[in-house]
Image (spheres, helix red, strand yellow):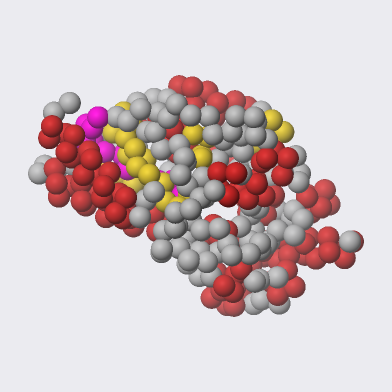
Amino acid sequence: MSEKRMTVKESIRRKALDLGFCAAGFAVARPLPEAMAEYRAMLAEGRHGEMTYLETGLDARANPEFLLPGVKTVLSVALPWPAPAKSGVISGYAIIADYHRVVGELLAELLDFIRSICGKTVNGRACVDSLPVLEKAWAEAAGVGRTGKNTLLITPDHGSRVFLGELLLDLELEPDAPLDWNPCCDCNACLDACPTGALAAPGKLAATRCISYLTIELKRDFTDEEAAMTGEWLYGCDRCIDACPHNASVKAAPYIGVEPIEELVKLTAAEVLELTGSQFRKLFAGTPALRLGLRRLKRNAMAALKREQRQ
């Protein structure tokens, strides 16, 4: 590898860290057959529930060339988000600014920087959980982290409270080596913490039993069994994240642009049932939870209140 390319690559990494990402890694843009085989097995087993959108874009998931013709490098980044100061009923990632926008804006700035230092035209495409990309597989390939038993990517220094993003580049850069690291070993804390048995086996999540899936992705009304499974949660679930020892040992500060919104930290199911449409939009403006809509949020709140009444 030439000294010039080494300089460009390390300059990009330093810029990514300066922007607030806690990790950045590079991988050769090529098909990932093992990851794709696991993905297809998940679909075949029906572990994705009613998330039919996961069945689309398989060609692009299998080969990033479909997303950016001429792509040579996948730059994978991780942005740390904070644990709430106290336990709530909305997942910690949803009581802060929408990560799609935050990570997307940072990737756009990073792409501008790459173009400024390369002295030639660089085509790139930012991906933040809205395009058919195998995000965890690319993060693993780029040495950013490894996937744990709870199916979340775990980074060595920031645990799994991280948002992932990718820049597809038609720029050839020396790849990083995947981490030779098993983040879980004999630990089963996440499996033990899951109240519904959604983590039936290490690395295998059954969405139809996952509280996050039920409260966020499921669009229809709950069955009685589903309503009983959601517990006190109004949006998402942090049980497996909170149980992970890697998250308990994080000492570095999260990205400063994603501070928790206090009104959402304190929100109760009873208060949700009193919300009007305009109040909901004002309260959740700029957060990932806005896309849920008030009807489904009230569905979740009613299930939580019925659980309280039974206890």
Quarter of the image where one finds residue 125: top left
Q: Is residue 157 magenta?
A: no
Residue 212 screen position, x and y as percent: 65, 50
Task: Kindly indicate the quadrant of the structure image that contains residue 20.
Answer: bottom left
Considering depth in this image, is 279 or 139 the residue closer to the camera?
139
* Residue in the image at 89% along x and 61% along y: 311
Q: Nearer the viewer, residue 309 or 43?
A: 309
In the rendered structure, the answer to whether residue 104 lies left or right of residue 304 reads left
| Residue 277 seen from this side | yes
Q: Which residues are magenta?
A: 163-174
Q: Residue furthest right?
A: 310
Which of the pair 295/117 is nearer the observer?
117
146 over 223 or under it: above or below: above
Q: Residue at x 34, y 42 (%)?
A: 24
Q: Residue at x 64, y 58 (%)?
A: 235
Q: Is residue 250 left or right of residue 177?
A: right
Q: Nearer the viewer, residue 137 or 279?
A: 137
Q: Is residue 29 visible?
A: no
Q: Is residue 89 left or right of residue 290?
A: right
Residue 164 highlighted magenta (yes or no) = yes
Residue 263 x %, y %: 59, 74
* Residue 173 against residue 280 in the figure, above or below: above
Residue 297, located in which quarter of the rendered image?
bottom right
Image point (39%, 25%), residue name: 31
Tell me the quarter of the image containing the N terminus.
Answer: top left
Q: Position of residue 195 (x, y in %)?
A: 76, 46
